Image: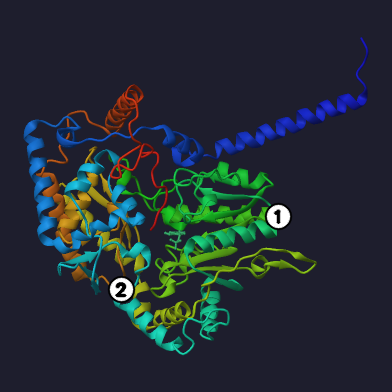
Amino acid sequence: MRELPLAWWIAGVSAVLMLSRALRARLLLSRAKHRSLQGHPRLAKRLAGVLPFYELDGDRFFSCDGAPEAVVARRRSGFARLGRHFEERSPTTLSYHRLSSSVSDLRFTNAYRVPFQYRTYVARHLRVDPVMQASSGVRLQDLDNAWSYDLSGSYGVNLFGYDFYKACIDAGIARVRDLGPVLGPYHPVIEDNVRRLKEISGLDEVSFHMSGTEAVMQAVRLARYHTKRSHVVRFAGAYHGWWDDVQPGPGSPVTANATYTLKEMDDHTLRVLDTRRDIACVLVNPIQSLHPNGSAPTDGVLVASGRVAQFDRHAYTAWLRALREVCTRRSIVLIFDEIFVGFRIARGGAQEYFGVRADMVTYGKTVGGGLPVGVVCGRGDLMKRYRDDRPSDICFARGTFNSHPYVMGAMHEFFRRFDAPAIRATYERLDEVWEARARLLNQRLAHEQLPICVEHLASIWTVIYTTPSRYNWMFQYYLRAQGLALSWIGTGRLIFSHNFTDGDLAAVFDRFIAAARAMRDDGWWWEAPGTTDRTVAWQIVRELAGAGVSRWRTPRVHAASSETMGSNSSPLSRYSGDFP
Ligand SMILES: Cc1ncc(COP(=O)(O)O)c(C=O)c1O
């Protein structure tokens, strides 16, 4: 037998080595993926595309868990009572639902307030306020003059109370009125905003954008430009706006080919960061410390009681420190996306709260003083959009409305008021205060043996259901009936502004307890012996399978009614975001 030439041997050994290195890298990547669908966005997207729509109407709406007739009757009458209550309390306000055939945002949020199986029946009978006419203190007023305590927090914008932002907008506009809506040259008020943002972020440069999504887009783009690497790492479940690269699963029609979705608070992830050479940046959304690797807890996917949340500051701090170390070692840009939690958990934001510095930080929401904004703060070398030695190699980012004088004016007023003693005082013992408030509500709920409790990160709360039930999503309507306004996310995110006094909260808690009592008395938390979250999940799987079979058997006549939104509505086609 002829011997192979040496060159062949070398080529063969090199190929084997390369292959084994690639396999090892792939294996590491797989181990750094969270086991849930949140950790596998592509798979989730594929499943979302095939899972069939079905609905529970009429009798099945009330008895899909096998409840006996007496319980079903209580549910029916409770449901009818709620419907009547909303119609009688706010007829003019509810008439604005006519907008949902023309305003696509409203059509979407109406459809995704509750799990899709119930949506048609709910939309027909339980409608929630699509419009409001006034805000004052911690309350909102609808067109029929009904006041509600606002637990929606305007998606996190409302940190200090609506009156604070009204004042920022009025004073801000007055300050820049002479220049008006001139774009291109800045109003000089921008200088002070930049100074404050640099101070708070501890970073060198600032850029202004029109939304949080755009700010994140720009931070990632700059990280790719400067590192000359392709991939962005985001963590399972984390929301960073609705841009394709940070929303690789259901929700976006395109495939994100340069995004790794990894497990948060996990050593395998650190190993991936430590070994791969294609990672430009890591995005951290600190709200995930409340529910690591879980998506925003919307009621639209609350098909059982699987919502989990628990904030562990110590563990999350340790995680961020480890992340910081590996990013520094590997020259990966660490980006804190503080658009939501920014000024909420500490005056210096998440960097101060967790004691970890990022290379770039994005802010938004509240810092616009009530007007729309996105901000990127970063190290000078990372923020530069061109290379001195390659004049055509630029990282372009401009926007017509960036640094709009009115927004800069409102932001300026935000920062002025941010320093006022009364606002400073809201940060004193912030954790202690909100911890005590959450504990108080939990004690009252436990005392009444109601099957719910709350978990929280400061003033961001989430309702946890302790009974396996297919109807937990109904609780949002009982809360609304009690005059507690929620965002379309429902009970997954209660966002308190920091002007809630203990007295306001006492009133909110009374209503909260009354809502839970009514929900219990109306039979929604009835439980068949032996029910667990797993048995509920299997029930749903069986329903889905049945729907799939009947869809396959029945020739398709039409794609979907405008009410039911089509066949890819499923627990998997969940809106994977946070807000708005
Ligand atoms: C952490 C985070 N990043 C980005 C965004 C997107 O911001 P915007 O809605 O202003 O585009 C949000 C919005 O909720 C957010 O919470």
Q: Which mark is residue 228?
A: 1
Depth check: 174 or 514 in front?
A: 174
Quadrant assignment, res 508: bottom left
- What residue is drawn where x is 16% and y is 63%? 92
Query: What is the tally of numbered marks visible in this picture?
Result: 2
- Which structural element holds mark 2? loop
Q: Which mark is residue 28?
A: none
Mark 1: C-beta under 8 Å from nearest atom of ligand 1: no
- What residue is drawn where x is 22% and y is 31%? 531
Amino acid at dot 1 = Lys
From the image, tell me which residue sits under label 2. 161
Q: Which residue is outermost to the front? A: 557
Spatial CA span between label 2 and label 1? 43 Å
Locate residue 289 relative to residue 357 in the image: left or right: left
The mark that comes first in sequence, 2 or 1, is 2
Depth check: 295 or 543 in front?
A: 543
- What residue is drawn where x is 42% and y is 51%? 577
Amino acid at dot 2 = Gly
Depth check: 65 or 360 in front?
A: 65
Quadrant assignment, res 500: bottom left
- Which structural element holds mark 1? loop
Judge whether residue 34 can be spotted in this image: yes
Counting from the top left corner in percent of width and height, residue 191 is at 55, 83
Locate residue 546 relative to residue 315 in the image: left or right: left
Judge whether residue 489 can be spotted in this image: no
**Ligand 1 positioned in quadrant:** bottom left
